[in-house]
Amino acid sequence: MAQVLLEAVSRQIDGNRVIDNISFQVPDGEFWVLVGPSGCGKSTILRTIAGLEPVQQGQLYIGDRLVNGVPARQRDVAMVFQNYALYPHMTVAQNLAFGLKMRQANPDTIRQQVTLVAQSLDIAHLLDRKPRQLSGGQQQRVALGRAIARQPQAFLLDEPLSNLDAQLRDDTRAELKLLHQRFGITTLYVTHDQIEAMTLADQVVVLSQGQVQQVGPPQAVYARPANRMVATFLGSPPMNVVEASFDGQQFRIDGQTLPCPPALAQHLAGQQNSRVSLGFRPEAVTLAPDSAAAQLRLTVSLVEPLGRETLVRGVIPSDRTVVQTVALQAPPHCQPRPGDSLAIQIDPASLFVFAGDGRTLYPP
Ligand SMILES: Nc1ncnc2c1ncn2[C@@H]1O[C@H](COP(=O)(O)OP(=O)(O)OP(=O)(O)O)[C@@H](O)[C@H]1O
Ligand SMILES: [Mg+2]
């Protein structure tokens, strides 16, 4: 096992910088998740680490070794793709043993390792089957097992769960976490699914348009996003962001007013009458107990009962053409109808303010 270190790694394709000045250091044994919207460069970074794409600029280290010029097969990393390919003519046991055999490990070690990995992944009863005799989820676990059995320096996973159905994806995600706890192999995991990122990662690297936006433990990044992109990307449903103006004491939002907590007002001092983007997560919104306590009024546009809660979306009434939508998680018995007026409160301690360029102004 080894650390993985990128120093100012960039790559251009056809004159476009698809990854731009990427730097981060994954310590030995940690599980890091690269997360970001489609096309932000996640797979390119992973493929670069694997040696499937050249490092055009910057330095890439695996362990203490600079691997810029080292061919893929000599990097001792194992990569699992979304479209995993098992060897169809080999049994599950032979697939799992393949990497070790290529490295001429001794047969006893191979047998032990295959048994251990198969048991961990709950595929021990399938060892004699061929891939075509397995379900999609079982095939995926064999692909993961084949990569783990090699005990590589680092484990590179590119959206490995995206072909699985929802239930199996949740189960396999939990299994992956257990596997990492057990084997401790340095892992880089790529996903656009922020729930996978939040649940699996020791640290997340949030990417957008080929650039790193923020690096940190998932809960810390969730609580203190560096900018609006990160704030709205992590979290489901995403953070609400509404355009507001600040008059020195309160926010004005489409003709309604929202009180500004003193600490925030102090922070914005000198910015009277400026336009800001105000963020608050759906979980910071509650229904007002009575109309006197209402801070904002919404017109309900969509109601989605989810069992444990009801996801309600409403718009802030206005005569502008651009409507501002607010999502909230209401208790399950709350089932308003589209068109209803809803009075809400917003936890003042949970407000975020973003500058015009997206930077987080508050909390500082
Ligand atoms: N061979 C290529 N030729 C031209 N452009 C490419 C090539 N490979 C990648 N790109 C571009 O580089 C950018 C990053 O691609 P990449 O596959 O790394 O994104 P991604 O974050 O993995 O996206 P997804 O979530 O959709 O898999 C994209 O804009 C893509 O169009
Ligand atoms: Mg990709």
Image (tube, helix red, strand yellow):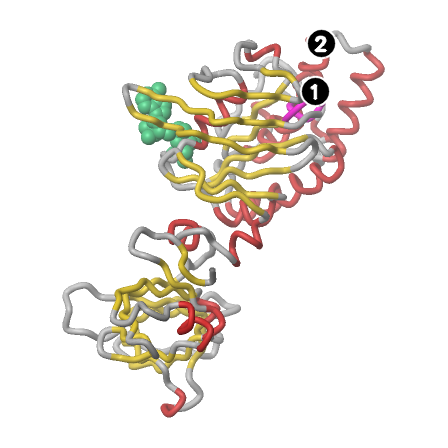
Picture residue at 71% right of the left edge, 9% below the top: 103
Query: Residue 173 at what x, y percent from top left?
Result: 60, 43
**Quarter of the image where the N terminus is located:** top right
Of residues 146 and 68, the one nearer the viewer is 68
Picture residue at 69% right of the left edge, 16% below the top: 94
Q: Amino acid at mark 1?
A: Arg
User: Which mark, residue 150?
Assistant: 1
Residue 299 vs residue 50: left or right? left
Picture residue at 31% right of the left edge, 68% below the top: 271
Q: Amino acid at mark 2?
A: Arg
Q: Which residue is mark 2?
A: 103
Magenta segment includes 220: no
Label 1 environment density (alpha carbons within 10 Å; few <14, some 14–19, many ≥20): many
| Residue projecting furthest to the right | 108
Is residue 257 something that shows in the picture?
yes
Start and end of the magenta stretch? 147-154
Is residue 305 something that shows in the picture?
no
Image height of 247 relative to 49, above or below? below
Mark count: 2
Image height of 363 relative to 349, above or below? above
Residues under numbered marks 1 and 2 in contact, where contact means CB atoms less than 8 Å apart: yes
